[in-house]
Amino acid sequence: MVTKSVIVKSATGLHARPATLLVKKASSFKSDVNMEFNGKKANAKSLIGVLSLGVTKDSTIKIIVSGDDEALAAEEIVKLIESLDE
């Protein structure tokens, strides 16, 4: 299991477009990908799950990945979230 923390820099947080990009990226990996924010946990492969966390700008979220490609998945997802500054 790989756990990483990342700060969301996107002006809109993880809403519609950025959340869709995140779900697509997470879904491209075999590993289970979860996110934690404000004590809530969601499957990062579920758009509804990601949106339900209500992640806003400058929030720190935790990415938890476990599976065959967990190291690569965690790295790629963190990189994507960091690049989401509109």
Image (spheres, rainbow, N blue to C red):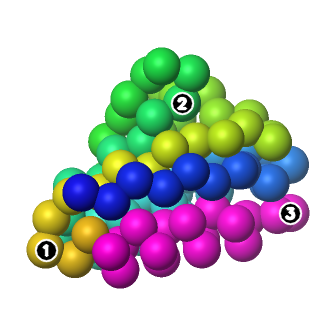
Front residue of 58 and 28 = 58
Q: Which mark is residue 68?
A: 1
Front residue of 52 and 42 = 42
Question: Which residue position holds label 2?
Answer: 37
Q: Which mark is residue 22?
A: none
Residue at 44% over, 22% down: 40
Mark 2: secondary structure: strand
Nearer to us of marks 3 and 1 is 1
| Residue 27 shown in magenta | no
Q: Which residues are magenta?
A: 71-86
- Amino acid bearing label 2: Phe
Residue 86 at what x, y percent from top left?
86, 63
Question: Which residue position holds label 3?
Answer: 86
Numbered-mark total:
3
Residue at 54% over, 30% down: 37
Position of residue 54 in the picture relative to residue 3 (left or right) = right
Mark 3: secondary structure: loop
Q: How many neighbours does mark 2 have within 10 angstroms: few (below 14), some (14-19), or many (20 or more)?
A: some
Residue at 55% over, 66% down: 78
Position of residue 82 in the picture relative to residue 39 (left or right) = right
